[in-house]
Image: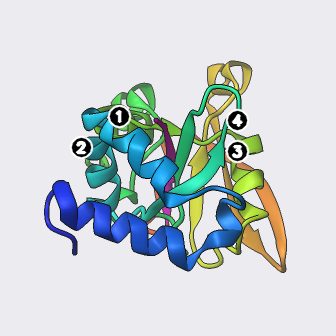
Amino acid sequence: MPKKGGSGLLDTLAQRFAAHPERHRGVEWETVRARLDANAGALKVLQAMEDTGGEPDVTAVDRKSGRITFTDCAAESPSGRRSLCYDRAALDARKEAKPKSSALEVAAKIGIRVLTETEYRALQTLGAFDLKTSSWILTPPEIRRLGGALFCDRRYDQVFTYHNGAQSYYGARGFRGALDV
């Protein structure tokens, strides 16, 4: 576990960056470090991602704006963000056996966004994730209005998108997030 914030986290991020060049081809760590140095608030968010088991790494760089995207790259859905229903409305709808929170609330508290289906599928091109777990994804409003929510996983070397009641929660389902710096 890295030291809170500062050089411990930066060392962890640099080591992960170096260990997985396939996630950010053509990007230099110095570019990432300069972006982080210019945005101290990002380190607090990245520390929270790390503390909840996300193992954030650089997965995209916007060449025009310089924006760098960090995404949860833990092999399985982050362990500190599991057993959550989808959102506050789903949590409020549960009459008993309520989980401690919801994916959208935890994401907001950390300061990250829940991955969309497109982002989740793009992440899966960089490695094999969620082979034993699943992750809530941002659900379109028309599905959510009807009480549902979407999640994804990878099985049989394929990425699957499924639906469930938004109030459901499972020990092996969490969510993956992203942060733009």
Circle nearer the viewer, 4 or 2: 4
Q: Classify residue 44 by image quadrant.
A: top left
Tag 4–tag 3 contact (CB < 8 Å): no
Question: Which dot marks residue 63?
Answer: 4
Circle nearer the N terminus (4, 2): 2
Q: Does residue 38 show up magenta in the picture? A: no
The residue tagged with tag 2: helix, strand or loop?
helix
Crowding at label 2, few (<14), some or many (≥20) Cα neighbours within 10 Å?
A: some
Crowding at label 3, few (<14), some or many (≥20) Cα neighbours within 10 Å?
A: some
Residues 97 and 118: in front is: 118
- The residue singled out by tag 1 in the image is 111
Q: CA distance from mark 3 to mark 2?
A: 23 Å
Rendered view: 125 above or below 143: below
The residue tagged with tag 4: helix, strand or loop?
loop
Q: CA distance from mark 4 to mark 3?
A: 18 Å
Tag 2–tag 1 contact (CB < 8 Å): yes
- The residue singled out by tag 3 in the image is 119
Q: CA distance from mark 4 to mark 2?
A: 24 Å
Magenta stretch secondary structure, dominant:
strand
Q: Position of residue 84 (x, y in %)?
A: 40, 50
- Give the magenta range: 173-181
What's the residue at 44%, 32% (across, down)?
A: 87
Q: Classify residue 4 by image quadrant.
A: bottom left
The residue tagged with tag 1: helix, strand or loop?
loop
Q: In the rendered view, does 11 fall on the left or right side of 65?
A: left
Which residue type carries mark 1? Answer: Gly
Circle nearer the N terminus (1, 3): 1
